[in-house]
Amino acid sequence: MRTTRSVLLLFASAPAALAAQVATSRATTIRIPDLAWLAPTISAAQDQAALGLAQARTAMAAVSPAIAQARVGMIRAQAALATTGLGWSSAAIFALDGDRERRTIASRPPEAWAQQDPADRAYRDAREALNRGRFATAADLFGQIYGKYPRSSYAGDAYYWQAYALSKRSGDDALRKALDVLQLQREKAPNASTRSDAETLAIRIRGQLARSGNEDAAATIAATAATAASSSASPSSSVSATVASTRGKRGRDQCKEEDDIQTAALNALQQMDAERALPILKKVLSRRDDGSECLRRKAVFIVSQQEGRETEQILLDAARNDPDQEVREQAVWWLSQVDSPGAVTALDSILRSSREPALQEKAIFALSQQDAPKARQALRDFALRAGVSDELREKAIFWIGQGDDPDRLDFLKTLYGQLKSEALRDKILFSISQIDDKASSQWLLSVAGDVNEGIELRKKALFWVGQSDYPLSELSTLYDRMPSREMKEQLIFVYSQRDEKAAVDRLMQIAKTEPDRELKKKAIFWLSQSDDPRVAEFLASLLEKP
């Protein structure tokens, strides 16, 4: 295909070159070769490309609902691990959930970097022990580093790695010792590279202790979480300045690490005492001071992990009233998991009244995940609504097609007749092709046979029937009844994509009896792509003189 394109580009520039040549020498004659023989090859390559795109589109449509649900499940699993000592790569979470990010504390020590350091050998041994899960040994070795070599370049971070190893051991004694070690790091090595991680680790450890009944740990977590609800406890000036300079912009760059301690405390509080956490989370979400956007984004996720009517109301309020676009979008997205009449009414309202396409798109998805008839009706009403973008209406049509309403075929057929946009009608053809029954295929065939319909839509309708399990015997008889040459060409392509031997039989029949030479050549080309052993003998027979 690239070679063909290069040849065409070369000769496309020939007229300009000819003009310059003629200007200098009238006697020169340049002959441009006839490239008509390339046309069937180019056309066939275009057909193959179109098929590949269509098949990819079908595959993505088939898995889109499952991906959406997997995304929810992965994020919920991440929340369940949030206060444990188990590590989970933030990259893995980010790949499934592009709208959210949870910072993961360091869990693997870096490779040794100071061979001349007297603690280098001890660090290497400690690092190996930790990476192999020998936590007791690792904790002892990291403790020896700052104990024996306090001036070592490894000493500052050794406190953190000892505490991390201790946090992996069972028992409250190990957890309490880990907190003591982290306090030592705060006093002895305040500039260590792991200090930020150390504060977060301390909160997680206290969360584990609090769940075991440690009242001091619970009180510390509650106090730290409460600071997140106070606008006076704003993040550092660097964060505030970043947020102020990027207000209205999307992205996570403005959300720095200073909020992680408060977020970890909120998460730990939620895990150990949800009733106590929700009022604090509500206060966090009510903040409107500069720099609170990042905390509110994290708070709306933590709220979403709770069940109950109050959770629904908090999310609804954030979706409607929060000034930050990302908070609103996250709230709407999580409402997809709240199955209640109130959520449906709110989502419908957002879909109708919002002027933010990204928010409306999430509302469409959220409604598609609801079981209530009112949610399905809201999607249908939006698909019927004129004056909104075709892209959003296409999303609604897609999710209608992915539903299980027994009358969705009738609705989509009616909608097709009302719409003028070719892009929307194309989306309806695709959505109907996903309804796996004979009635949908028969309706698509009726579109393919409608001479008053646009030729491209007719061809697409026929293509989608060919991709289904519609009986080949009925598709085979359609060829002789199809007056349009373009549609006959599309049928040849459809036959070429079927696996049945009868499809090869039909192509051989067309290649042998079709009076139209171009259609005959099309059939021969697609036969040449078949792996049916009979094809070679058939093509050889065409070379024989009659």
Image: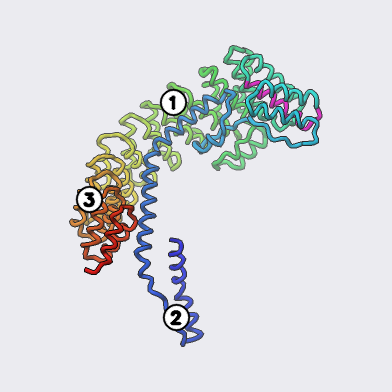
For the question of whether residue 323 can be seen, the reply is no
User: First in sequence: mark 1 or mark 3?
Assistant: 1
Taking 105 as reference, is 468 above or below it?
A: below
Using the image, tell me which numbered label, if any, was put on residue 102. Answer: none
Q: Residue at point 61% right, 12% down?
A: 215
Measured Cα–Cα span from mark 1 to mark 3: 51 Å
User: First in sequence: mark 2 or mark 3?
Assistant: 2
Give the labeled residue for mark 2: 30
Quadrant placement of the N terminus: bottom left
The secondary structure type at the circle numbered 2 is loop
Q: Residue at point 57% right, 15% down?
A: 211
Measured Cα–Cα span from mark 1 to mark 2: 76 Å
Give the labeled residue for mark 1: 312
The secondary structure type at the circle numbered 3 is helix
**Residue 482's x, y, as percent?**
20, 57
Q: Residue at point 54% right, 41% down?
A: 250
**Residue 322's x, y, as percent?**
50, 33
For the question of whether residue 74 can be seen, the reply is yes
- For the residue carrying disc 2, how many other residues have a C-alpha within 10 Å: few (<14), some (14-19), or many (20+)? few
State the image quarter where residue 60 is shown: top left
Q: Is residue 285 left or right of residue 460?
A: right
**Residue 284's x, y, as percent?**
56, 27
Q: Residue at point 61% right, 22% down?
A: 204
The segment highlighted magenta reads 150-168
Residue 161 part of the magenta-drawn span: yes
Disc 2 and disc 3 in contact, CB within 8 angstroms? no
The type of residue carrying mark 1 is Glu
